[in-house]
Amino acid sequence: QVQLQQWGAGLLKPSETLSLTCAVFGGSFSDYYWTWIRQPPGKGPEWIGEINHSGSTNYNPSLKSRVTISVDTSKNQFSLKLSSVTAADTAVYHCAAASEYGLDVWGQGTTVTVSS
Amino acid sequence: QSVLTQPPSASGTPGQRVTISCSGSTSNIGTNTVNWYQQLPGTAPKLLIYFNNQRPSGVPDRFSGSKSGTSASLAISGLQSEDEADYYCAAWDDSLNGVVFGGGTKLTVL
């Protein structure tokens, strides 16, 4: 069974770059699309984007100009970078493993606050 | 503003049956399958229903899903106090080329 462990900075100033990493334990790294999702306070989840083991990506068009998702298969890790953050990017950010069934496994979440 | 539309709240007493609706469009629910996620307070969402009406191993058969056209529903029968949570529908959207979610329904067990 796949397990995910994520980490990264939780407090950013406007215009800085958000950087989060998610480590994958168990399962096969090639079986999933590795996904980032965020959840603003009191709101529903928002899909940020995904990457597969070969580096093929899909991004949410509303964030595409600021988002980079990358993968390091040697470490079984994938990462999220979101540039030029503003207060509107304040949210709990989750990594997740997506299969044909859906978002099967979620990371524990990282609260990211953008404040001057 | 979420792409999929859910009622913000629902409630029921223990033992009752409640349903939660999810409305979308031809580019998402009308074309692709629907998932439902349960989010207990302070935790990450958990996959509850996939392929419109299938339950992952370990999900009680009190939970059921259905889809018709561009709408879907989640039904919970024999309501229990531990079912108190936020519920989200989701589907792949062919226009966005990504996953879209509902805004969530907060279920209260009275």
Image (cartoon, rainbow, N blue to C red):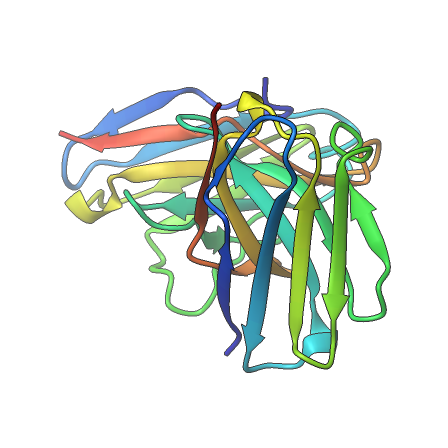
- Rendered residue at 75%/27% (across/down): A62
Q: Which residue occupies the foreground of this view, B29 or A89?
A: A89
Residue A93 lies, in percent from the top left, at 52, 44
Toward the viewer: A68 or B50?
A: A68
In the image: residue A37, left or right of residue A64: left
Residue A110 horizontal side relative to residue A62, left or right: left
The image quarter in which residue A14 lies: top right
Quadrant of residue A61 in the image?
Answer: top right
Q: In x, y percent, where is residue B110?
A: 13, 29
Horizontal side of B72 relative to B87 (left or right) equals right
- Asked if residue B95 lies left or right of residue A96, the reply is right
Which residue occupies the foreground of this view, A99 or B54?
A99
Q: How many marks?
A: 0
Classify B34 as above or below B25. below
Q: Vertically, is B8 above or below B77? A: above
- Asked whether residue A99 is in view, the answer is no
Q: Residue at x 46, y 26 (%)?
A: A43
Residue located farthest toward the top when viewing the structure as drawn: B1
